[in-house]
Amino acid sequence: MIRVKKCLNTLKGRLFSSLLALAFHCLGVTQNLADIQWDIQSPLDYQVFQRDSLESGRITIKGKIEGLDAAASILQFRLGDYPNKDWIDAEETLKNGSIDCSVAVPAGEWHQVELRIINGGVSMGEYVIPHVGVGE
């Protein structure tokens, strides 16, 4: 009986993997998620940016992402510490895997900045900077 259960669990795992691969193939996503490598130079954890006004400032997002089709990809960001956690497309598109853009955020506190890459409507990977500030 134990052998039968192990066999069934193995078959379930293989079936799930096959269905997942088929779903990605049907969506046109053929890239291996493990191949994507993030090299973010800005913002760094606990980095503080100068504010533009009492209420807000801009943080600079710079870096490189390797292992993806940059021409078909969109960089999105959100502040993970805010109630409205909708993903927002970055102003600049990825060029040869390079990121160079800035985004306006509220001043006066630490923010969790979350980045993700969308390709063919599917998230290809996410990157989180836990503490980014805008202030003096």
Image: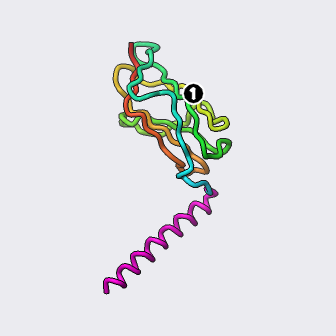
Could you tell me residue 64's position as x and y percent?
A: 58, 35
Residue type indicated by callout 1: Cys
Q: Which residues are magenta?
A: 1-29
Magenta span: chief secondary structure: helix
Residue tagged by mark 1? Answer: 101
**For residue 88, side relative to residue 131 (left or right):** right
Q: Is residue 110 left or right of residue 34?
A: left
Placement of the N terminus among the 4 image quadrants:
bottom left
Give the answer, above or below, for where 72 lies relative to 134. below
Observer-nearest residue: 65 or 136? 65
Q: Which quadrant: the C terminus?
A: top left
Q: Quadrant of residue 2?
A: bottom left
Front-most of residues 44 and 113: 44
Task: Relative to 51, say whether 92 is above or below.
Answer: below
The image position of residue 116, as x and y in percent, is: 51, 42
Q: Residue at x 52, y 68 (%)?
A: 19
Q: Nearer the viewer, residue 64 or 54?
A: 64
